Image (cartoon, rainbow, N blue to C red):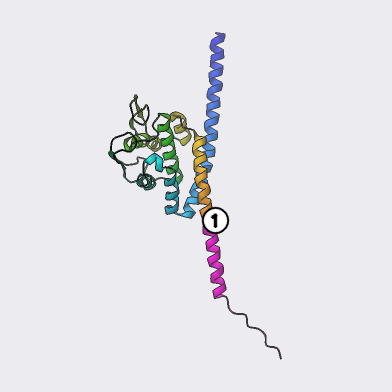
Amino acid sequence: MNTIVRIGAVTFAALASVAAASTQDAVALQAACARFDRNAAIVGAGQTSARISQDFVGFAGSDMNADRLVAGLARGVPIPLDAAEGVGTRPASTVRFLPPAGPMRYSSVYISLAFAQQELAGLGVTRPAPGDIKAALVGGTVATGGDGGTGRHVTLPGILALRSRGVAWASIAQSQGVSVGAVMKAMNNADYDLSVLHAHKIGAAIAIAMRTAAIEAPEVVGVQRH
């Protein structure tokens, strides 16, 4: 009886600790998302998309695939992904899928790709084929055991599929073994770059305003002395 009580107490304490950590992650992630989306709105879709794509070229397999992923997730439109012969150890393949979560804010785009990348890496797939990326995002089966896919097959629920059902980011991370801290660190680095672009944009606007004011300002007529 005493043993059962002790185990129950330890289990309760462990669950309470996990719940507290999950709550902290959720609060911190919400704040990070707000900052990211605020800067994205000011900098604009083009520069924001380019900055996000920059972090996922290796994951996507090419610049074009990274751009397609970011644009497709942001707009909620079908995403085609191509893999040429000889990329990694997988055969050439092409997939196309529709994000189930609909249009997403840029912070959500970043988190979705970062979660998918980290989840696949945890399974030993560090150079995923298009089919692996699709499975990680919308659900499906991937072959583990390295980039050759020689190990066991694992069925993934899909980061976007979970999100479309209203599951919180922190809960998705916990269930899929993703580190929220690592994702936030990477997203904060991207957000810093956006804030720099924001500052440059403000500086340019001020400079233009000052030049315009100088051009349009009426000339000061001196008082003639006798």
Q: Which quadrant: the C terminus?
A: bottom right
Q: Which residue is drawn at 63% across and 83% down?
A: 221
Q: Is mark 1 on a helix, strand or loop?
A: helix
Residue 201 at x, y percent in the picture = 51, 58
Rendering quarter of residue 97: top left
Q: Which residue is drawn at 52% across and 40% down?
A: 185
Q: From which residue to which does the magenta span run? A: 200-226
Magenta region includes residue 62: no
Compared with residue 213, is residue 117 higher up or lower down, i.e. above or below?
Answer: above
**Which residue is painted at 52% across and 55% down in the image?**
198
Percent position of residue 71, x then y: 37, 48
- Mark 1 surroundings: few (<14), some (14-19) or many (≥20) residues within 10 A: some
Q: In this rendering, would 189 be left or right of 146? A: right
Question: At label 1, which amino acid type do we have?
Answer: Ala
The x and y percentages for residue 46 are 42, 53
Up-down: is 205 above or below 55?
A: below
> At x 47% / y 52%, what residue is drawn?
41
Q: Mark 1 points at which residue?
A: 199
Please identify the residue farthest to the top as the structure is shown. 1
Pick whichever, 181 or 89, lies toward us.
89
- Let me know if residue 132 appears in the view: yes
Residue 83 or 200: which is nearer the viewer?
83
